[in-house]
Image (cartoon, grey):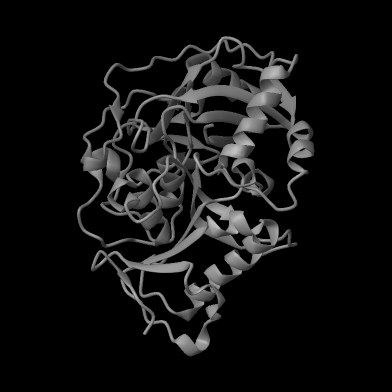
Amino acid sequence: MNGGLFITLYDDRTLALYLKYGIYGFLMPPIMTAKPSPYSRHYCVLADYACSRQGAHIFFFLKRRIVYGGVVKGNVDIASFYLNGKTSPLGRVANAELFWDESKRYTPTEQAGIFKVRGKDRAQPFVLQFEKNDTVTGKQISSDDLYFELGKYPYPLPSNTIQGMGFCTLTPGESAIAYKLLSQSNKNFDAVSDETMIIGQHQQLFDSGYLPEDSVYQNEAHIEFSLLADIDPIKHLFPKDDYILCRQVPISPFKPANMDRADICLYGLSNRLGEGTIPNIIIELKRDQANFNAYNQVVRYLRWLEKITNKDGFDKIQAYIIAPDFNINKKKIDARYIEKIKLYSITSKDFQQIA
């Protein structure tokens, strides 16, 4: 069972191009300064890419259709994406060459890899490459087909909350259902690309050595990226298992707005919960000191998970708050899950206790 990436596109022509070459790159503002603004979505995008591993399924979503791409190729144990040129701080650290350039599809600029889309500078500093499947790539289903199947789960899943997002990670359960439906489909995406692109030979696959050694984070998405890109340094904190990684997962009943989302969720493959739709590990991250609000946020996640699992399943769920340090007033927290919530300091690299 693999996880997946659910990628939103807006036109058939672009999807045809990506299926032709087995490639995808999110269009985003180039970052030519040493650090992105803490208010930019730069690290949010990177954190999604950081969940990718070789073998993860890629599903394209457009115009109420879902089309199968293939499986991610590259790294097995760390984030599996390619650095495409020097239009991001990470690309400059890696001295990455530009190997995929869509400039001619839009309005080129004088800077390599930067082009105008509706008057705004855009680039593709991070690229996924996927292995196509001769029998499934290009098959399509209606989005209703997927959502009717997911309707048997009485709780929201990442694919239910993709509105307004470029792409999101999928739980192993969602990915398995989507792949099964697509593999059984008799419908094919029929657009054939007449565009010719050149894929350069000098491709720089992400390496954990490109992560900074210091722990000065721009925002919480920056921490998400750093942990998800190479989770091995903290994997000893969790029960032993092989995990599928997801981020910004709804852990909440259906609500009109402000649905609670866990920063990081890990789905164990040996101890699957909810057919791979319920996380075994929930991680709440804080860039600064964590207080009682962070703790009570995790309590809300656990309250909901206790309602949608049986006792045996709930016993297998662990929650973690990861932050530089903690100042949690015991009088202000709901202590019902105090044995299930662990506090880990990224400064001391050790577990902490509530004072």
Whole-percent x, y for residue 170 in the image: 57, 41
Work out which quarter of the rendered image holds the N terminus and state it: top right
Residue pictured at 32% horizontal, 17% vertical: 200
Whole-percent x, y for residue 136 in the image: 62, 16
Q: Is residue 152 left or right of residue 246?
A: right
Residue toward you, 255 or 303: 303
Residue toward you, 210 or 108: 210
Using the rendered image of the protein, determine whether residue 259 is visible from the camera's viewpoint: no
**Quick check: 177 above or below 209?**
above
Residue pictured at 71% horizontal, 18% vertical: 184
Q: Is residue 54 left or right of residue 117?
A: left
How many numbered marks does the figure carry? 0
Residue toward you, 19 or 112: 19
Using the rendered image of the protein, determine whether residue 148 is visible from the camera's viewpoint: yes
Residue pictured at 77% horizontal, 43% vertical: 152
**Quick check: 354 above or below 315?**
below
Work out which quarter of the rendered image holds the C terminus and state it: bottom left
**Quick check: 22 above or below 256?**
above
**Quick check: 304 above or below 266?**
below
| Residue located farthest toward the front when viewing the structure as drawn | 312
